[in-house]
Amino acid sequence: PGFRQRPEQADPVLYYLPRLLSKTNNNNTDNDEEVLLDLPSLLNAAQDDVRLHRGRVQAGLKKDTRLIRTYTLEKDPNYQERQTRLEERLTMVQDMANDSPDILGKLQEDKASVKGKTQAEMAQMHLLHWQQALEVYVHCPPALLSETGGNTINDEVKKELDWSTLFEKLLDGIPEDQDISMILAQASDMCKGLVKQCKTFVKDASQNVSDMEASYRIRLQAHTEFARHSLQVVGQIEDQFKRSGRAALQIGQQLEHAELKRSQCEAASVLIRRWWALETLAEAEENSEDGMEINVMDEVCGNLPQDDCQMDALYTAPENSLEASRTLKQLRAVVRSKGNAAATGTASKAVLHDKAAQRRFDLTSSLIRRTSEALEQRLLGTFELVYQEGGGAYDFSAKPRPGSMDWRELRSLAQALLLFDSGRNLHSRYVDMVVQSRFPELFHHNSQASTPKNRADAEFNMDATRSKLSNLFHRVTDVCTAEFELIAYVFGSTSHAHGEAHGGRSNEASGSEEMALIVARALLQRVISDPHNGLQARINDLLSSIDRVGDFDAGAKKLDTFVVIHE
């Protein structure tokens, strides 16, 4: 093997790491479930290979193959001594770097500053200072004393760290009558000792770097194997995902369909229980001894105390208005579906010939119809009351000012009223409220009082009427602008919410048009095209009054009237 001939240059041979990989692959082959490699296990195997490599190197150096199995760093005295020497050198270099300004400063001291000493003592002291400066030059060169290295000395001291300068300083500090050969011999011994010390440090560093390089290569191989294995596992997961993606999609669709069916069954169960509750109430009403009908209108509208009500709180409590409206719409759909089935012949014979079932169904249908009418009337009354309390003051900000119309309450009421015949009664009631409260001069006008009796009255009334007509057009513009904004907030959001609740947009008479556009169009048609009080009728009355007077300037008055209308 190579470690016997060149132990220090032998490449690391892996044993434990391939063994772990082979064992993992065999387990994956035998078992259905794949065993994953974890990084700590790979690093532990790599650490065993590092110890094995160091043991092979020591076995080659000491010619003892038993060290391959028994060698450990903790029991290697050479390794411990080498680490101790490297730590001592690091401490020595740090101390020299800190003391280098003082050492070089002592070397530059004047000869006169050391009085009372013999020449031999002065020479030995100077030689000691020179030895310290030489060690600073060798162990802490100027490149290591820069600011990037962490040590700082001034530029003048850096200039002194030069071999020629140091050699001149050696001779400058020696008295002229002193034997130079002795000084040079001592300086030569100092250099030889320093070279030997540096040789030891270099050898220790080389062995340490070689050891660290082998350890790094082995651990790098462990990380490489982990990355390769992870990439392989990710590829398998990706392939499995591609294979199972279609099945997962089908399963998800099936679960979604099952959840939809479950929610439909729950809704149907709730609807059946509510039908039974109304059916029981209708039979109790029919079989009562006094023959008194349930006062549905008073109970639903809140005219009776809650304790005296026979109907469920779902229909009598105002906070349940939206849920009650949805329930009644579903119940009305059940009634219509039964009638359609009987008309088309799709109903079963048992249903058609069971007189008792038919009687119960008719009684329940009648109670559902009465409850729906009562609830719609209550909601319409509340809607009108909230609209009148607002007084025409609209504020659609996040924090409306006090006294403004509660448009959020109007929106919730409209959302419930939309479930009754697509909100047709709500549209009519809203348009009536607007024209009666916002256009009193138009819809409360007495047409008989405006008919002129003579030519003077006709000329006077004609001018006043034209002025009123001009003001009325501006009034219509201002009111419609404000009402259109209210319609957008109340009916626009109501249409959107109704569409979401039924899986799509609302099914209105206008087809695909939005609810807000329907209400706005109805308001404009009422204001303009009302046959008795609309703008068109007022204009026709005005033109007819001009013709009835028959004045010679009737054409000019008509032209003035047309100009006012155009403006």
Image (cartoon, helix red, strand yellow):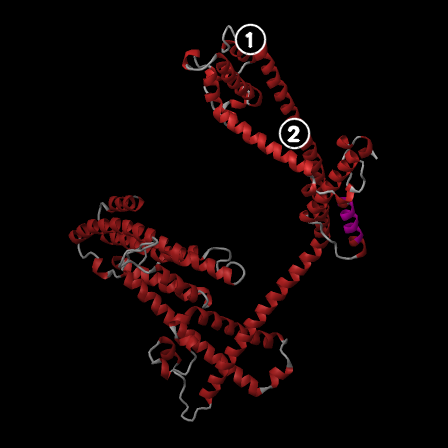
Residue 54 on image: x %, y %: 73, 38
Q: In which quarter of the image is residue 564?
A: top left
Mark 2 secondary-structure assignment: helix
Report, in whole angstroms, how far the alpha carbon at label 2 lies from the one at label 1. 40 Å
Nearer to us: label 2 or label 1: 1
Question: Does any portion of residue 248 appear in the rendered image?
Answer: yes
Q: Residue 285 sits in which quadrant?
A: bottom left
Residue 435 on the magenta segment: no
Spot the residue most to the bottom. 289
- Tell me if mark 2 has few (under 14), some (14-19) or many (20+) residues whose alpha carbon lies within 10 angstroms of its own: some
Q: Is mark 1 on a helix, strand or loop?
A: loop
Label 1 neighbour load within 10 Å: few <14, some 14-19, many 20+:
few
- Whole-percent x and y of residue 414? 40, 63
Quadrant containing the C terminus is top left
Q: Residue at x 57, y 76 (%)?
A: 338
Residue under pointer 1: 179
Task: Pick out the residue farthest to the top.
Answer: 176
Which sits in the foreground, 308 or 171?
171
The amino acid type found where label 2 is placed reads Ala
Secondary structure, magenta segment, majority class: helix
Left or right side of 45 for 320? left
Give the magenta range. Answer: 17-26
Residue at (68, 27) in percent of width and height? 203
Q: Where is residue 410 in the image (x, y as percent from the top left)?
A: 36, 62
- From the viewer's side, name the closer residue of 57 and 324: 57
Q: Which of 546 and 290 is in front in this view?
A: 290
Can the viewer see residue 532 in this picture?
no
Q: Find disc 2 in the rendering and name its residue.
A: 205
Where residue 117 sits, quadrant-wise, is top left
